[in-house]
Image (tube, helix red, strand yellow):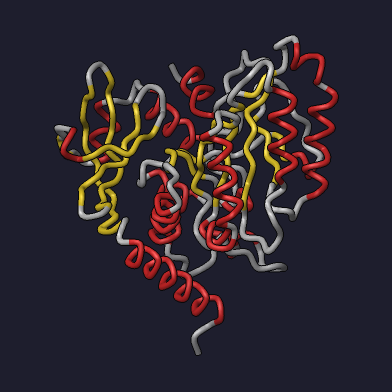
Amino acid sequence: MISFAYRYTVVLFLLLLCCSVNAQTISNYRTYYAYASAGSKQILVLRQFKKDAQDFFLTVDLYTLQTKIVAASTLSVKPVQFEMLEKLYAGTPYFRALSQARNTSLSLQNAGIVQGYPDEKGITLTIDLCPSHKPLDRVIFTSLINEFKKVEAPVPLALSLSGRFMLTHSADIKWLKSMEVAGELNITWINHTYNHHYTPNVPLQQNFLLKPGTDINFEILGTEIAMLEHGLTPSAFFRFPGLVSDQAVVDKVLSYGLIPVGSDAWLAKGQPANPSSIVLIHGNGNEPLGVKDFLQLLQSNRKAVLNKQWLLYDLRESLDDEFK
């Protein structure tokens, strides 16, 4: 008998495929690894796809970790196996971050990069948007803008985005994009898998992305396609649902050129935020305690914020500084 979870995944896949075809935008999406240079910049091609019948690349800057969508006709690329690229450019911040993530991924939980640059006066904020029937906690974002508008504009933060959240929260995604366009927010869009599978009372070793039969290729690429369909640029970062993984799934994620990001300060679990912490809260309406703790954290640091002694850091810039 076909399980409900399997049928649900198939339905989601068909919905995503249907949306892509009807919109006539993203097609032939696949991994594609190549080296290219754009002026003085060294960039790596991670993905290739068609948008309205035109070829595009998803690229990442090896030094700034910034990703961009680039028309294929504007780049001269040299296809190379990812393992060879890793050897050739091992000293760049991008590949050093990948290596660090691999070396700190031996435990069942919290694989990957868990702290930012040690000398930072503040934190790197990551907000997870797991599947939810509740609306986006917009108070998080409006509070950030109000507190930091005089010292940091746009406000840098990272959103770990799941495909199923995008499927049911198009208005919230549009609102977040409008905050970017208005220069209020600077968002790094982290891949948080498409389905974000979770079953209560099932051991972690068989839960989340470790559920037997999980199609990791779809979980990763399906999420990136959904981001592109919503007008978002996928980053080079990945967050494991529940922060749960094993070495095999970590290696699989790394093979897609994605840097796993954990957290040393999941506020709802009582973990304190220290200088250089990668803070985790949920903005999907399912974690009011974490939101409350973060808003209190903002209030307690208000004076330091105004004096630029407690800042928010861009995840890409933080890791760029750490791995230079």
Task: State whether residue 295 is above or below residue 175.
Answer: above
Q: In the displayed image of the protein, which residue is found farthest to the bottom?
A: 1
Task: State whether residue 9 is above or below residue 90.
Answer: below
Q: Nearer the viewer, residue 295 or 175?
A: 175
Quarter of the image that includes the C terminus: top left
Q: Kindly indicate the quadrant of the structure image that contains residue 35.
A: top left
Q: Nearer the viewer, residue 70 or 247?
A: 70
Please provide percent x and percent y for residue 10. Answer: 45, 75
- The residue drawn where x is 19% and y is 40% is 72
Please provide percent x and percent y for residue 162. Answer: 54, 54
- Taking 202 as reference, is 63 left or right? left
Please provide percent x and percent y for residue 289. Answer: 82, 46
- The residue drawn where x is 21% and y is 47% is 55
Figure label count: 0
- The residue drawn where x is 55% and y is 40% is 178
Please provide percent x and percent y for residue 160. Answer: 57, 45
Q: Kindly indicate the quadrant of the structure image that contains residue 276.
A: top right
Task: State whether residue 260 is above or below residue 315.
Answer: below
- Taking 29 as reference, is 7 left or right? right
Q: Nearer the viewer, residue 97 or 163?
A: 163
- The residue drawn where x is 53% and y is 38% is 112
